[in-house]
Image: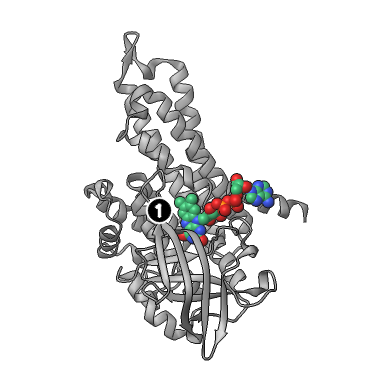
Amino acid sequence: MIGFLEERHIDLRYRAQAWIDASDLENDHDPLRIVGRLARHELLRACVPAAYGGLRERVELRDLCVLRGVLAYRSSLADTMLAMQGLGSYPVTLAGSEAQKQALLPRVANGQTICAFAITEPEAGSDVSAVATRAVRDGDGYLIDGVKCFISNAGVADSYVVFARTSDESHRGLSAFLVDGKANGLTTSPIELIAPHPIGTVTFERVRVPASARLGEEGAGFSLAMSTLDFFRSSVGAAALGMAARALDEATARVKARRQFGRPLAEFQATQMALAEMAVDVAASRLLVFSAAHVIDAAEGPGGVDAAMAKLYATEAAQRVIDRAVQLFGGQGVVRGCPVERLYREVRALRIYEGTSEIQKLVIAKSLLR
Ligand SMILES: Cc1cc2nc3c(=O)[nH]c(=O)nc-3n(C[C@H](O)[C@H](O)[C@H](O)COP(=O)(O)OP(=O)(O)OC[C@H]3O[C@@H](n4cnc5c(N)ncnc54)[C@H](O)[C@@H]3O)c2cc1C
């Protein structure tokens, strides 16, 4: 990745990799304990700016991509917990008041506050402008009513960034609020997915927040949500890349060890073709992800299309690579607990969250047709 990464990103990668390789992170299934471990090893510092306990003067996407790649190689749950500390605090980094930043960001970096980002609703998925949750002025604050679904960290989060409607204007009617996880009227119920991931529905019934809980101006919520998602999108590709790289390594080891027809599977050309195509998918994903992250960090352009391409390609490619790894494992590949079986379940959601593959294609096509 020479050219896209600088020495500081490579150092971070080696430091994180050394700890993760020596740890049993892969077998840790407790989200809160994982956040504590990520904090102790100072990895969460990549999620906030240096003035608030972070790693760099401003949050750098290449750090997040490097970390998501190495974490997802071992544990998609650890990757999710790091990603949510970033996604659920970045709107505060972008639009928070000094008081909001001081109160939240140092606690995000040291793992004392678990974050969530709540935009999706039962009738507002890909179409964010359909958000119906309302925040109505009430004296010196707001009352929030509505239902959010598929919210990562629902039930475990201490702090939710909630996007709610403050007027009937479509996109311009949305505003963002910081809501305490223990607020009166906020309840959660879990959703069980095919892979480990704390997630659920969050219901707001007359949840009262002070005006000081609003992030930025009234009506600025949609653009804040999009700026946050645009920033993080390529990091989803990085997580996919980590999973694909793991599947390739597992498959390579397996075909060298497994013998059929009197020789290792690795000696059959059909196996070699499969491995070669998997390796190209992994290499192409790596280039797209880190080139998008470089463009966005360097502010060389808006980066939205680069991020969409990186997410689209890397997540679709990871699905292909992992599916092939399962095939190369034969029956063992679908036995619960086999690493490629786990990856097969864990990678699936990446083509859906933070904008489905179809939505990424629309973003790319729109830029071509403009
Ligand atoms: C593991 C996981 C974690 C998540 N975490 C969060 C979170 O923390 N916070 C949060 O707010 N949300 C979260 N989500 C929700 C996620 O962002 C949505 O699931 C996603 O945006 C898609 O919305 P939807 O599920 O309503 O699907 P829909 O929007 O109903 O889409 C269904 C299908 O229709 C396609 N489609 C929709 N519109 C078009 C179109 N115009 N053209 C072509 N095809 C189209 C989609 O691509 C998809 O294939 C998470 C989801 C998952 C699975």
- Total tally of numbered discs in the picture: 1
Q: Where is residue 249 in the image (x, y as percent from the top left)?
A: 36, 34
In the displayed structure, 182 sits above or below 357; it is: below
Q: Which residue is found at the position 53% from the left and 69% from the top?
A: 146
Pick the front one: 212 or 101? 212
Tell me the residue that label 1 is attached to: 68
User: Residue 256 at what x, y percent from top left?
Assistant: 32, 22
Is label 1 within 8 A of ligand 1 (CB to nearest ligand atom)?
no
- Mark 1 is surrounded, within 10 Å at the Cα level, by few (under 14), some (14 to 19) or many (20 or more) other residues, namely many
Q: Decide if residue 355 is in sight here.
A: no
How are the colours assigned in the image? one colour
On the picture, is 183 further left or further right than 369? left
Can you tell which quarter of the image residue 15 is in? bottom left
Q: Nearer the viewer, residue 39 or 224?
A: 224
Relative image position of residue 22 (x, y in whole percent): 22, 48
**Residue 340, image x and y in percent?**
37, 34
Residue reaching furthest to the top: 261
Q: Is residue 74 visible?
A: yes
Judging depth in this view, the residue of 14 and 165 nearest the camera is 165
Query: Would you say 254 lies left or right of 326 here?
Result: left
Residue 88, quarter of the rendered image: bottom left
Three-letter code, disc 1: Arg
Helix, strand or loop for disc 1: helix
Q: Which residue is the extreme one toward the right?
A: 370
Pick the quarter of the image with the C terminus: bottom right
Residue 303 in the image: above or below residue 136: above
Q: Which residue is located at x 40 percent, y 53 percent?
A: 68
Picture layout, residue 118 above or below residue 342: below
Work out which residue is located at the far bottom of the displayed protein and give it.
139
